[in-house]
Image (tube, helix red, strand yellow):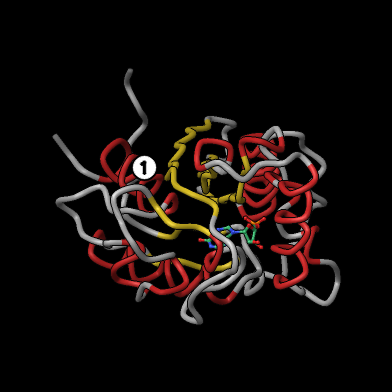
Amino acid sequence: MTHRMLQPGRLVLASHNAGKLREFRELLAPYGYEVISAGELDLPEPEETGTTFEANAELKAVAAAAASGLPSLADDSGFCAAALGGAPGIYSARWAGPEKDFAMAMRNVEEKLQQLGATALDQRRGSFVAVLCLAWPDGHKEFFRGEVEGQIVWPPRGEKGFGYDPMFQPDGHDRTFGEMTSDEKHGWSHSTPGLSHRARAFAAFSKACLEQE
Ligand code: IMP
């Protein structure tokens, strides 16, 4: 598959989240991009009305590209419990409510698993998913998906991460994302795909659109 390369210059990150902005600035710095956030440009935050990660990433990237006239990158991510049909999935943030109470959101996941009698390891599979959409003002779009699979653990362990990190132990590791440093969790590097869903999506994106053959 051929991908459109992103020419060095200004790139909009279609997010109002300061943490995401910092992370993407650091990742894109070596490639010579100036990353501006949708917040800095005062772009409106579109409602996430899609029913898939791809659809939500697309509507954010397309809106930012149309409003700014610049290539725009958006991501959408979430935590999926296999036994719950992939929930909370695209509703991961919403399960935490307006107070962003992730202890409650994790309890909710665990209660639903308990209601299903999901106590065996193979009934407690989970994953994190991240989808990146890069949209150009002329309507061209590229999509990249990163996933990491593992076990859903209870009780939650670790104070280092955010969101659902403390209840997720990636395969091949004996610690949860909540017990890992950011470097361990993402494994940011330009030679390996990394561990986290976001690192893997970014690696696919940089290989396809940033790195010249
Ligand atoms: P987004 O900002 O719309 O992509 O929402 C992502 C939501 O998914 C966050 O609010 C978290 O609840 C959850 N999530 C995504 N990535 C992670 C992660 O790396 N660790 C923990 N939770 C995550």
Q: Is residue 197 visible?
A: yes
Crowd class of label 1 (few under 14; some 14 to 19; many from 20; radius 10 Å): many
Q: Which residue is mark 1?
A: 205
Q: Residue at x 31, y 46 (%)?
A: 203
Whole-percent x, y for residue 204 in the image: 33, 40
- Note whether 3 is above or below 39 in the view shown: above
- Note whether 151 is above or below 187 in the view shown: above
Of all residues, the one furthest to the right in this rendering is 98
Whole-percent x, y for residue 60 in the image: 67, 48
As helix, strand or loop, the secondary structure at mark 1 comes to helix
Whole-percent x, y for residue 165 in the image: 53, 65
Of all residues, the one furthest to the bottom in this rendering is 159
Q: Amino acid at mark 1?
A: Phe
Q: Residue at x 62, y 44 (%)?
A: 80
Q: Nearer the viewer, residue 67 or 125?
A: 125
Q: Nearer the viewer, residue 68 or 164?
A: 164
Quarter of image, ligand 1: bottom right
Residue 154 placement: quadrant? bottom right
Whole-percent x, y for residue 149 in the image: 44, 43
Q: Is residue 130 visible?
A: no
